[in-house]
Amino acid sequence: MYVFGYRLPGLSSLLIWGLLWEIVGRAELTFFVPPLSEVLRTLVAIIGTPPFIKALSETAYAFSGGVFAAIVIGVPLGILMGRSRLLDELLLPWANMFLSAPLTALVPVLMVLFGFGMKAIIITTALFAIWIIILNSRAGVRQINRSLVEMAHSFGASPVDAFFKIYFWAALPEILGGVRIGIIRAVKGVIIGQLLISIVGFGALFELYSANFLMAHFWAVLLVLFALAFSISEFLAYLERKVAYYAAKR
Amino acid sequence: MAMSQTKRVLTPVENTPTEIAVSARNITKNYGAVEALKDLTLEFPRGQLTSLLGPSGCGKTTLLKIIAGLLKTTSGEVEVNGKAVTGPGPNRAFVFQDFALLPWATVLRNVAFGLELRGVARSEREARAEKYIKDVGLAGFEQSYPHELSGGMRQRVGLARALSVDAQVLLMDEPFSAVDEQTRRKFQEDLLSLVQNENKTFIFVTHSIEEAVYVSDQIAILLPRPSRVSEVIRPSGFRNKGIDNIRRDPEYLDIVDNIWASLRSYVE
């Protein structure tokens, strides 16, 4: 964006919103919104404290476990669904249903099935992320240029070669898009899991701060979480752009 | 109309018996209730270029893919060097109409991809790929990606890939239809010298009558629904007069006219 002929760096609109936040906070309109400067001071104060580190590592553990499972199961399953009519008929209705289902309502069922611990949180996270990963991988495989497949076949590619040298790469732009959206959903999943199943990690911090009306602390943790989710998503968007040059020309 | 479809062979088959590299015998191919090919028999002499020519939907590409082993016949069989075809094999290489290049791989890897799938070691396959990249006139583009090349250059990559596996039979599915007219003419001239210099059997699908007559030692005219070979034409007079004289040779012009006369009624 240009203002008076000067090119503004990306995200500079955040300054305006930050300023607005500061003004609302200083005006003391509501205890719910402390000034941004106070939130940032709190952030610096609590970052590095043992409870914060513990919350971060617990959340990171559940999050990465869930995302890892969602990718490792979701991508191959989506590719197989894109290739096998039978598997597609069997699983597609479920994938579509769970994609739009209010998964939060399922969390109590997961608690009954898998207990009140980390396992249930990881499964919740994976469940939030996996459906879009499956559907995107499937869509990626289904739009592969038929002659690429015939080419591999005509030069004698084994099924394993075809899978790793053709299908995976041809579907990669869609797969990365699915993983990126899946990860954003996983952030939601991991926090919901930590709030509903067992009060650990950032979920526990949220619970603690909001119960004690420590609003600056509450916002500080929320900012950290937003920043983490945003960075991961941007990193994947960067990877997506790296393969975009062939996404339109397959 | 009916008169023009008489099965007249324009020139008698040469006296020297040529060895047959590929033969298709009594090929029938059905897609459900649709008969794409019916009892088609055709022989392809070694070291020569045979065109499959016909109106769209006449099953030329189907026949080519059957020879490639990419499609199964409903009945009948294809033999390459006396051995029945059961699937793709190293004695045949395919050149695709839409090039079928890996968009995520460099020209070098694309050309070497056929060898890569056959398990040739990296250094060896890249050395061979480099040679063929130079042969098709793409030296200096080894590290380029397909989207950085023009249509004609992409098809040169496809051709280099097919040549690098050193198959005896080259199957070309309308290889020049997606490139512009001038590039196509250059390709046709290059193809003629390729047929002369490489001792390979070429099977070439096209819908262009002029192209077929220009490049072919033998032209098989296929008529549709269900397809069968209606006639086989072997131009003989103008092949040795030099590439610049072909297009004004009376025999060339006669063959083009005759083929159009027999195909005209099949074109919607």
Image (cartoon, coloured by chain):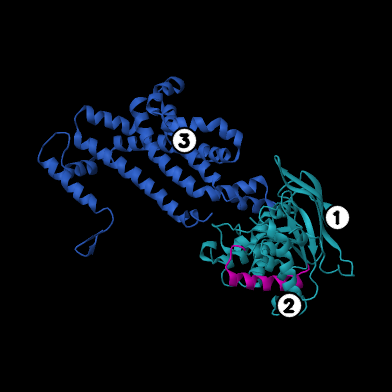
Q: Classify residue B80 as left or right of residue B133.
A: right
Question: Looking at the image, which residue sits at the far left?
Answer: A27
Residue position for label 1: B82
Q: How many marks?
A: 3
Query: Mark 3, chain letter?
Result: A
Q: Residue at x 43, y 27 (%)?
A: A120
Q: Magenta segment range?
A: B177-199
Q: What distance separates the C-alpha of mark 1 from that of mark 2?
A: 37 Å
Circle 1 crowding by C-alpha within 10 Å: few under 14, some 14–19, many from 20: few
Q: Residue A94: horizontal and vertical position, in percent? A: 50, 30
Q: Residue A47: horizontal and vertical position, in percent? A: 27, 41
Q: Residue at x 27, y 38 (%)?
A: A221
Q: Residue B126: horizontal and vertical position, in percent? A: 64, 64
Circle 3 crowding by C-alpha within 10 Å: few under 14, some 14–19, many from 20: many
Secondary structure at badge 2 equals: loop
Is A122 above or below relative to B139? above
User: Looking at the rendering, in which quadrant would you find the N terminus of chain B?
Assistant: bottom right
Residue position for label 3: A131
Query: Mark 2, chain letter?
Result: B
- Residue B138: in sight, yes or no? no
Q: Colour of chain B?
A: cyan
